[in-house]
Image (tube, rainbow, N blue to C red):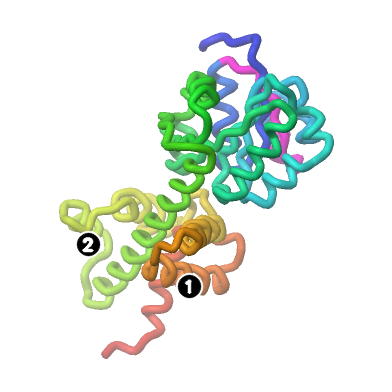
Amino acid sequence: MSERPNVRVAFVGLGNMGAQMSVRLLDAGYDVVGYDPSDTARRSFVDAGGTQATTAAGAIRGSEFVILMLPNSRVVELVLGDPDVVDALGPQTTVIDMSSSEPVSTVDLARAVSKTGAVLIDAPVSGGVAGAKAGTLTIMAGGRDDAVAQVRDLLAPLGTLTHVGDTGAGHALKSVNNLMAAVGLLVTSEGVAIGRRFGIDPALMVSMINKSSGQNAATDQKFPRYVLPETYDSGFALALMLKDMRIATGLAGALGVPAPLGNRAVEVWASAADDLGPEADQTEIARWTFDNASTRATP
């Protein structure tokens, strides 16, 4: 274990991803103070060896680095807009928003945070709960060169960091990545539904596609791990995937970039979200697709 006794890290957001990421930082020797509104999440963090705070400001005060792993930009805005949090930030503080947030909001928040003397960078991740647990996340960082360089060692236990551009670029890239992943998962679900209707074994289909040109993240990982075993427990909510898709298509609209496939995919995922409810896992889009296919009469 590397010892870094002089570095205190505030970790705000101890959900599915944050719980794993914060523990990896603890294991790397950092002094991590965690906060989450959930008592259960905070207790689990303490059981893992962390120190809990009862407020976000309490975790942030005195911390050199502040990592945010929150559901969306609105929650990030609420946390960073809290007067107690603003008071807790200072010129030695680097705020790292690792949530999947809206790029425009990130730029505005970075400007607001800078008034306290602190700096904000965005560093969203890809790799899911499994990647968070293993420390193999892909980290897409946006912000000033010096600020990104300053967090490289800190984030190394979590995965591989790449500086992708100015403030907000990480969140822009993450949203595009998730739009592409969502389209891949949806079309894979539709393709497997077609093959099932024709009588082809789904596991055989996925195995063959993984040796062919249709291979993608859904066939390689999500179907074998979560869909074919019918566990549907990837740890990433369908509603959060839909949120990220909307960020990407909204950004496309703002930039004047046509995204007809992306927009249609958002419509389909929104229908699934309405039917499946807010607690559904992203991989349940496959079950929803299969169920819809089974209600159609065979031609």
Q: CA distance from mark 2 to mark 1?
A: 27 Å
Residue 161 is situated, as x and y percent measured from the top left of the image, at 43, 30
**Residue 166 belongs to the span the image colors magenta:** no
Task: Identify which residue is drawn at 40% across, 72% down.
Answer: 289
Q: Residues within 10 Å of mark 1 (few under 14, many from 20)?
A: some
Segment colored magenta: 29-44
Task: Identify which residue is drawn at 44% across, 46% down.
Answer: 173
Residue 176 is situated, as x and y percent measured from the top left of the image, at 42, 53
Residue 244: tell me if it is visible.
Answer: yes
User: Along the polypeptide, which appears first: circle 2 or circle 1?
Assistant: 2
Would you say 111 lies left or right of 134 here? right
In which quadrant of the rendered view does residue 138 lie?
top left
Closer to viewer: mark 2 or mark 1: 1
* 163 lies above or below 209: above
Task: Identify which residue is drawn at 45% across, 39% down.
Answer: 130
Kind of residue at badge 2: Met
Task: Identify which residue is drawn at 53% across, 20% down.
Answer: 150
Q: Residues within 10 Å of mark 2 (few under 14, many from 20)?
A: some
Q: Are marks 2 and 1 in contact (CB under 8 Å)?
A: no
Please tell me whether mark 2 sits on a helix, a strand or a loop: helix
Q: Which mark is residue 205?
A: 2
* 204 lies above or below 103: below
* 295 lies above or below 201: below
Residue 127 is situated, as x and y percent measured from the top left of the image, at 43, 41
* 297 lies above or below 158: below
Q: Which residue is mark 1?
A: 267
Residue 26 is situated, as x and y percent measured from the top left of the image, at 59, 21
Kind of residue at badge 1: Glu
Instruction: Please tell me which residue lies in front, 272 or 295.
Output: 272
Please tell me whether mark 1 sits on a helix, a strand or a loop: helix
Residue 229: tell me if it is visible.
Answer: no
Instruction: Please tell me which residue lies in front, 78 or 56.
Output: 78
